[in-house]
């Protein structure tokens, strides 16, 4: 089941059309015709700075460390750094790295390894004029604001646009761009995205492989560059990340001075075992949408030169955002004058690929905080319950920390009881002669029923301890901590999906295991260890797909038996109706469908609204009357009238539904509806007719930050 989305722009609502007694839908649009944000917290691109000035931020690379986001950016004279607590409000700190006799400090990226920030960038001799003398270097600092100190050069020839990432196989990879593979091509010469393994953070394996090479005219940097008819192409600025069972690499192409500089992407299927996920050996495919030019991000009427992005999690530790640079399209382009500024937009996953509303220029909902969010600036917030022990707040140059009393067993929990959460916190602990034991409470009912992730720095192991009815068992142990420095800050991210728990440390996969499926409150613990915790977030969230769909019965109720067969579907030929267990209001639902036959369809009942999707059309209605979609911002990106298919050849469709503050927004590829919605108890009902539900994601839109702000605390 899928939908054909036309590229025509529908007219917006008018009061005369609304004959059904509902609130006037035009109230949901701004005077300029843009959608009003759902959330009370908003931002408008380009993101502002505290001093009120316009700061350039070319090639922005954003890293979250404890309480703050750090943006590292290109400049003629050094590497620029800025900070933000929320991705929206930024403070410039000037240069974090300069070097005498060098210029053109290009495209920095930073990775934290055992408490040391490693920055990869390129620059060139000050007296040179040929930018192909840009050489990639590595500099380090224990302070994310610098100053960084140069440690090594990774190349002796042209190389730019680094990203260093740990793969889930434990290998350190370097993504970069150079001219070695396609620079002398007779077909499409130019710059390509490459990958090489790092033996250490300062040395390459020197076995480079191409990842993304030029394939189309839209990637041309300069026509007839050599006077012999050959056009020069540029593919650069790679960023690696993953979602579900797919890996993605975004890239930018042509030239940043061009108004249609764009972000595209490649994707690859991930193996079942994380240890087998070798980034340089995956089968990468460039997203072309059936050989049509289909960029992820490209200019609109208001923004141009969009490109060179990084991907970062929102404060809720769930939502991905794309950070990129662009120029105001109304400003005259001055060659040689830096005009690129930082912009952010949400990144969504749909139909097996990527989607974003960007480049936006009107007010948008700001990145979400967690359902529970605490920076410990004032100790534990009121929502915490201290089960035992004590802790106090300390501050340093990097932020605030909650430090446990080392003379007792400290346990504190917060939020509502849940079996579906993402928990994210930074932690460190000193190792005394007695060792060090600390970690995260995943599930707390009482002293005899709890689950915790425990870091035992003395024994150099990480384990999950599950206590059921007073009987404790160790579910999983990761003993590969010989290079792990518990004195340094590390980020721990735990995703709980009922009885499944996945653990990531510093963004890398660490372990997964089964635990009790009973709900409980989440929090922190320390066993007679002066452990420090910083930037805690817990978000109500669940993401089910593949084998994980076996838990879908906990999220919905069906009127007949369901089976898992390439998704969830009726066990027979008759349609099946599903009712979601959670209300629409204050939640985001992302539903993935696939048609079992060409006549497959899905019908959604959303309070007084109905949506029907078939292989040839999508219709959104209220009381039998079709409602037009809201006009999308004009941009070069065009949604063609073609069906998207999965690996099995089934037509697919992704529907995203959000309801908050009396409004519901529904989005399908290329179309958005925003309508009044005040039924706080309404739950979605889905009828599958020769169709399967292949993916289900639920994320809470509520935040303790919003609640405290509303109450004036």
Image (spheres, rainbow, N blue to C red):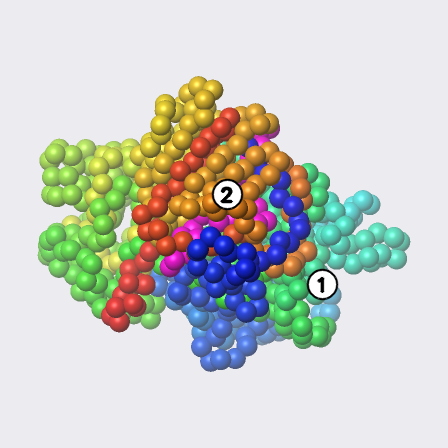
Q: Residue at x 40, y 49 (%)?
A: 588
Horizontal side of 556 relative to 386 (left or right) equals: right
Q: Residue at x 49, y 73 (%)?
A: 48
Magenta residues, as a range? 649-671
Say if mark 1 contacts mark 2, CB within 8 Å.
no
Question: To which residue does mark 2 refer?
Answer: 624
Outermost residue, right side:
228
Tell me, yes or no, whether the highlighted magenta stretch contains residue 422: no
Badge 2: how crowded within 10 Å, few (<14), some, or many (20+)? few
Residue 528 location, x and y as percent?
A: 14, 53
Q: Nearer the viewer, residue 711 or 386?
A: 711
Residue 397 location, x and y as percent?
A: 33, 71
The answer, for residue 240, to whether it is visible in the render is: no
Horizontal side of 382 relative to 675 (left or right) equals: left
Question: To which residue does mark 1 refer?
Answer: 258
Q: Quadrant of residue 499?
A: top left
* CA gap, disc 1 and disc 2: 47 Å
Vertical order, 528 against 480 (above or below): below
Badge 1: how crowded within 10 Å, few (<14), some, or many (20+)? some
Q: Secondary structure at mark 1?
A: loop
Horizontal side of 287 relative to 415 (left or right) equals: right
Q: Nearer the viewer, residue 470 or 592?
A: 592
Q: Nearer the viewer, residue 427 or 6?
A: 6
Q: Nearer the viewer, residue 500 or 202?
A: 500
The secondary structure that most of the magenta stretch takes on is strand
């Amino acid at each position: 089941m899928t939908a054909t989305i036309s590229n025509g722009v529908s007219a917006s609502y008018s009061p005369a059309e609304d004959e059904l007694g509902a609130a006037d839908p035009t109230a949901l649009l701004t005077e300029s015709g843009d959608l009003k944000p759902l959330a009370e917290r908003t931002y408008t691109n380009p993101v502002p700075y505290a001093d009120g000035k316009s700061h350039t931020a070319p090639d922005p690379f954003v890293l979250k460390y404890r309480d703050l986001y750090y943006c590292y950016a290109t400049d003629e004279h050094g590497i620029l750094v800025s900070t933000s607590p929320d991705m929206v409000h930024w403070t410039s700190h000037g240069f974090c790295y300069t070097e005498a006799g060098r210029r053109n400090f290009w495209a920095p990226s930073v990775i934290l390894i055992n408490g040391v920030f490693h920055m990869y960038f390129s620059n060139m001799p000050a007296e040179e004029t040929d930018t192909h003398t840009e050489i990639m270097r590595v500099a380090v600092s224990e302070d994310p604001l610098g100053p960084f100190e140069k440690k090594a050069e990774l190349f002796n020839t042209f190389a730019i646009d680094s990203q260093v990432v740990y793969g889930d196989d434990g290998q350190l990879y370097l993504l970069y761009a150079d001219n070695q593979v396609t620079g002398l091509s007779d077909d499409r010469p130019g710059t390509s995205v490459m990958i090489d393994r790092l033996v250490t953070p300062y040395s390459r394996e020197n076995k480079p492989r191409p990842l993304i090479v030029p394939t189309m005219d839209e990637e041309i940097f300069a026509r007839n560059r050599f006077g012999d008819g050959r056009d020069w192409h540029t593919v650069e600025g790679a960023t690696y990340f993953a979602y579900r069972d797919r890996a993605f690499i975004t890239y930018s192409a042509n030239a940043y001075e061009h108004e249609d500089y764009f972000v595209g992407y490649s994707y690859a299927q991930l193996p079942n075992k994380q240890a087998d996920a070798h980034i340089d050996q995956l089968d990468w495919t460039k997203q072309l949408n059936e050989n049509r030019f289909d960029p992820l991000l490209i200019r609109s009427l208001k923004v141009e030169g969009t490109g060179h992005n990084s991907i970062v999690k929102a404060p809720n530790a769930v939502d991905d955002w794309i950070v990129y640079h662009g120029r105001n399209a109304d400003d005259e382009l001055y060659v040689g004058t830096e005009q690129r500024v930082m912009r952010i937009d949400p990144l969504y996953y749909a139909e097996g690929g990527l989607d974003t509303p960007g480049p936006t220029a009107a007010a948008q909902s700001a990145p979400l905080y967690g359902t529970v969010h605490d920076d410990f600036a004032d100790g534990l917030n009121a929502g915490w319950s201290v089960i035992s022990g004590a802790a106090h707040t300390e501050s340093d140059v990097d932020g605030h920390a909650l430090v446990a009393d080392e003379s007792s067993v400290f346990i504190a929990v917060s939020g509502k009881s849940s079996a579906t959460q993402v928990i994210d916190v930074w932690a460190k602990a000193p190792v005394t002669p007695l060792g060090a034991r600390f970690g995260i409470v995943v599930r707390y009912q009482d002293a005899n029923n709890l689950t915790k992730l425990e870091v035992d720095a003395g024994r150099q192991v990480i384990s999950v301890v599950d206590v059921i009815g007073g009987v404790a068992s160790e579910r999983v142990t990761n003993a590969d901590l010989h290079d792990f420095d518990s004195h340094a800050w590390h980020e721990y991210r735990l995703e709980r999906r009922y009885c499944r728990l996945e653990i990531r440390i510093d963004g890398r996969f660490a372990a997964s295991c089964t635990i009790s499926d009973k709900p409980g409150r989440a929090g922190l613990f320390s066993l007679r260890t002066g452990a420090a915790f910083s930037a805690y977030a817990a978000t109500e969230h669940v993401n089910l797909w593949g084998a994980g769909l076996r838990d879908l019965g906990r999220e919905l109720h069906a009127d007949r038996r369901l089976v898992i067969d390439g998704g969830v579907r009726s066990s027979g030929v008759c349609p099946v109706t599903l009712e979601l267990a959670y209300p629409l209001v204050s939640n985001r639902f992302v539903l993935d469908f696939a048609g079992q036959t060409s006549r497959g369809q899905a019908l959604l009942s959303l309070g007084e609204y109905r949506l029907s999707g078939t292989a040839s059309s999508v219709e959104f209605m209220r009381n039998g009357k079709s409602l037009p979609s809201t006009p999308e911002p004009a941009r070069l990106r065009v949604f063609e009238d073609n069906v998207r298919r999965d690996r099995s050849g089934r037509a697919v469709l992704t529907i995203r539904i959000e309801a908050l503050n009396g409004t519901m927004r529904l989005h399908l590829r290329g179309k958005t509806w925003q309508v009044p919605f005040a039924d706080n108890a309404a739950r979605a009902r889905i009828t599958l007719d020769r169709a399967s539900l292949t993916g289900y994601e639920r994320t809470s839109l509520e935040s303790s930050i919003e609640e405290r702000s509303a109450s004036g605390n």
